[in-house]
Amino acid sequence: MSLNFSFKVKKTRGEGSGNSLLKKNGLFLKGDSGETILLIHGLTGTPNEMRFLANFFNKKMGYTVVCPRLAKHGEPINTLKKITWQDCYQSVREAFLQMRNNSKGAVFASGLSMGALLALLLGEEFSDTISGITCLSPTLFYDGWNVPWYSTILLPLFYATPLKHVVYFKEDPPYGFKNKALQKRVHKHFSRARLNDPTMVEQYGYPYFPLTLLHQLNLLVKHLTKLLPDINVPVQLIQAKDDDMTSIRNSTFILDKINSKTKELVLLNDSYHVITADQERDTVANRMYDFYKRITGSTKKEN
């Protein structure tokens, strides 16, 4: 992670006009199985990082798939940096309520990185209607092998000062991918990207990470940690043993704190952080489906 300071971010065309530089809607795929799944992308990410799972669950398994774009994602970075974690949760919550009201079968939620935390919030608030949750590379602590050791010292200091409004982190290789071809493709774009350049954000997400958003993530973690014991819906956690951004401590922490009777941890051997698109994405999709199938099967038996 490289540290960058910017005291003025130029406005890009479209900012202030009320029009997003990218499509505001996420992914919606209508299925015929009766089951529905909400997929939640990560902070500064894009619905595109959930596309493989969306196609798997819709085309192969017949699920209706909803993947909303988080609040202000796709907007210029000067707009994105002003959002709160509550804004992100509200965009997810609205999508969940809409799909729940239109679903006749089981409803599941799954999120990547910060999206996993938002999925857990849904599980706590809607425990009576959500059938199960999958947390993919959950991010409570930035403690992976590619995160600088000094970040745990510097970040809290920045959070407490106005510096948080002008500091950005730029991602460095491997960008959450163990797959060499994906690394190369992302590096080609990120190495040339400028702070206020929205080019290819729809496909790759933002090259720069505003510190204000890391601060919001930190506030979300503090809020969610208090609620973990109240979560009792089935929860599945999937994470790479060699995650470059967040260690498996993130998953084991959640596993230990929640009060779900049905819970499991799946560890991957050949992936980094973005497991929805990396080397073992097929394994991720199949393990998720198996988990949901066990849940719906047990529900049918009880009925």
Image (tube, rainbow, N blue to C red):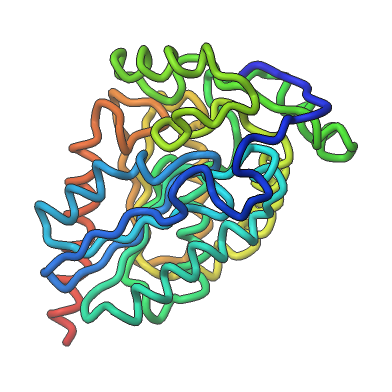
Q: How many marks?
A: 0
Q: Nearer the viewer, residue 298 or 191?
A: 191
Q: Relative to residue 126, is residue 231 depicted above or below?
A: above
Q: Quadrant of the C terminus?
A: bottom left
Residue at image x 22%, y 67%?
A: 295
Q: Residue at x 41, y 66 (%)?
A: 260
Q: Picture coordinates of residue 43 (x, y %)?
A: 54, 43
Residue 248 shown left or right of residue 216 in the figure:
left
Residue 73 locus on image (x, y percent): 54, 46
Query: Foreground: 115 or 265?
Result: 115
Q: Position of residue 128 (x, y in %)?
A: 40, 81
Q: Is residue 80 left or right of residue 205?
A: right
Quadrant in which residue 213 is drawn:
top right
Task: Indicate left or right for 286 with 97 as reference.
Answer: left
Q: Is residue 251 visible in this depiction of the protein?
A: no
What residue is drawn where x is 57% and y is 66%? 90
Residue 234, x across and y down, in percent: 35, 65
Residue found farthest to the right: 161
Q: Quadrant of the N terminus?
A: top right
Between 248 and 292, the residue placed more toward the observer is 292
Observer-nearest residue: 73 or 37? 73
Say if 247 sits above or below 260 in the image: above
Residue 190 drawn above or below residue 21: above
* 106 over 172 or under it: above or below: below
Give me the residue at 18% from left, 62% from top. 63
